Amino acid sequence: MEIPLNRQSPSIALVAPTKTGLALSQLIRAGLPDASLWTKASESLSTPVPELQAYREGLSEAISILWPQVDNIIFVLTVGAVVRAIAPFLKDKATDPGIVAVNEAGTQVVSVCGGHIGGADALARQVAAILGVEPVITSASAARGLPGIDVLGEPFGWRRGSGDWTAVASAIAQAHPIEVIQTCGSSLWQRQLPEVHPFVWDSSGKEQETIARIWISEREFEPVEQPTIGWHPRSLWVGIGCERGVSIETLERGIRASLQKHNLAWEAIAGLASIALKRDETALLALAERYEWPLQFYETEILASQAVPNPSEAVNREVNTPSVAEAAALAAAETKALVVEKQILRGEDGKACTVAIALAKTEYSSRCGQLNLVGIGPGSLAQITPAARAALTQSDVVIGYQLYVDLVRTLLPSAQIVEASPITQEVQRAQRAIALANRGLTVAVISSGDCGIYGMAGLILEALARDGWDGKIPHVEVFPGVTALQAVAAKVGAPLMHDFCAISLSNLLTPWPVIKKRLEAAATADFVVALYNPRSRTRLEGIHIARQIFLQHRSPSTPVAIAKSVYRPDESIQVTTLVEWNVETADMLTTIAIGNSTSFVRGDLIITPRGYVLTEPNANSGHINRADAELNL
Ligand code: SAH
């Protein structure tokens, strides 16, 4: 049975009591398109706002409607007014919505409460990214670059167990040493810890006296003196065999008894597994549905091939495999050893079930993975789109080439998992990103410029398609960025005002005859041309040939821009002509723009005419015919 995976989109309400606030919240909603928008009914609006909801009385009327319904509320209002308004509704940080306040000018975004479990810290980062400002996040863990202890396992789909969450959080806030015991689940969260952190993994030597514990395990923790919190990665696969018509109570009691006997946690259950014959076993289906567990069914051959500790001749005679529960648990967990061997429980109605449990190496996650393919622009943080910024801050993991990761490092939440790799490892990066997304994580893959122009977007989509991707899971979103040719064009005026094309001179992935053919075609057809990857240490010849081809078809005085590291600290830009162009100055951080037959230079700028008829100054200035105006403006 398929359990639908959860897309991680919290329901968000934007509440803006004033007209100025309403204008700002529309800007915020552009980046959070699913958010509902609320204002006071008396506000008269000159232009109608789509899907605006109104409350009549005070703010508390809106809050009382929204509080039980939404995951987050963003108020465009002073923090003081927000605090007064929400005070009567606050109950418990595990259930209250996360609250964010934004000032009317849009220059301050404050995570007010529900920072971790409520998601307010993450949302404040996202809203701040949309507005291009710094969020105000006051939680102790954020300040010290630590993951919030109460959200630690969320990216991996872990479930919270029992524990004294407040005591452990306050021990962390006071920087006391904390013992970490982790027996299963991803250890990715440990990678991004700052140099100074309070976690102690091996306390057996007791060099450091720890005062609290974080318990990450498939088992329940034994109560000890130290305050402890439990996280349970969903790693246990429960194999089930049963008689036809068994009751759901018998199944549930069988599972609970097996777990208890071995001190295993209910929250650590990944899902159920059984024999294909049981696809229509009502109680099995109902139990999986009740707890939103995935249910795996296996054909007899697969079950019969598992080496189990307690095979049964009787079972073999009946269903052609000597084991159902044990074999199904092993198959689902993809392992060879059981943590609980076959247990038999008979219900009051006389119908029995068997239960066996195996521990998977990788935890199951009910989250639907997401790949954010993000173009970060040519270099400067100012050139990244707000949507791309927001996508970065929202992702659990950021993957990219070291240089690009370093460019955006200051935008990333300090506890975010970042994986940087050398330049040549594009394929490995794509595979890693897909593997993590398949485990339910939200993964941002960054490219410089636009990620769909000689970037990672195509590679990732291609790899997904090759692996039989259904186009839905993981969910893919592409965030455009300012590509090198736009950046270069902006620096040298308006060279791209007429038809243009981009050609990469790198023959690593494209055979040189193909590149040459495209250069000739572009030169002949009078395109303005941007040359990417013009010259590397080993590819010295191509750019000479490119210049020769253009000289054959264009005037020697055709403008050429040589733009290196545009929007980066070592930017250099030179405008020259085809005949004077010294191709040796180009490297892999350079883009070349070559004008068309009408392009000309004024000062340091290249201008390619669009074709408007410009009349003399004062004589009905700048008039163009009406059809053109409609076409172009
Ligand atoms: N996805 C990128 C292109 C990657 S291919 C984009 O859309 O811009 C790498 C090539 O891009 C480099 O060899 C260079 O030609 C060009 N490039 C990337 N960033 C640049 C920058 N800041 N200045 C000049 N050229 C750049």
Image (tube, rainbow, N blue to C red):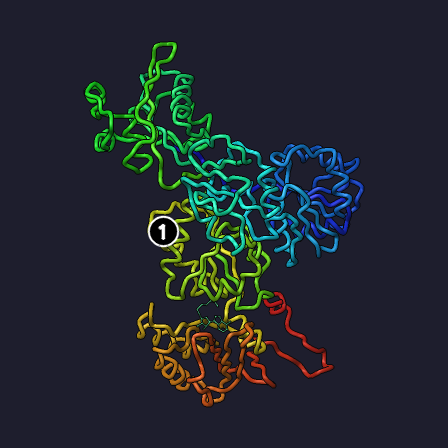
Q: Residue furthest top?
A: 349
Q: Is residue 619 left or right of residue 145?
A: right
Specify the quadrant of the image occupied by residue 470.
top left
Per the image, label 1 sits on a secondary structure element best described as helix
- 553 or 594, nearer to the observer: 594
Up-down relation of residue 254 to residue 69 (above or below): above
Which quadrant of the figure contains the N terminus?
Answer: top left
Up-down relation of residue 434 to residue 382 (above or below): above
From the top left corner, tell me how far across and down residue 443 is, in percent. 47, 51
Residue occupying image coordinates x 36% and y 58%: 428
- 134 or 34, nearer to the observer: 134
Q: Amino acid at mark 1?
A: Ala
- 466 or 443, nearer to the observer: 443
Q: Is residue 179 left or right of residue 342?
A: right
Specify the quadrant of the image occupied by residue 65.
top right
Residue identified by numbered label 1: 465
Residue occupying image coordinates x 79% and y 35%: 57
Up-down relation of residue 566 to residue 281 (above or below): below
Specify the quadrant of the image occupied by residue 94.
top right
- The residue carrying pointer 1 sits among few (fewer than 14), some (14 to 19) or many (20 or more) residues within 10 Å by Cα, namely few
Which quadrant of the figure contains the C terminus?
Answer: bottom right
Question: Is residue 473 visible from the viewing direction of this image?
Answer: no
Question: Is residue 70 visible from the viewing direction of this image?
Answer: yes
From the top left corner, tell me how far across and down residue 403 is, in percent. 47, 66
Residue occupying image coordinates x 44% and y 49%: 188
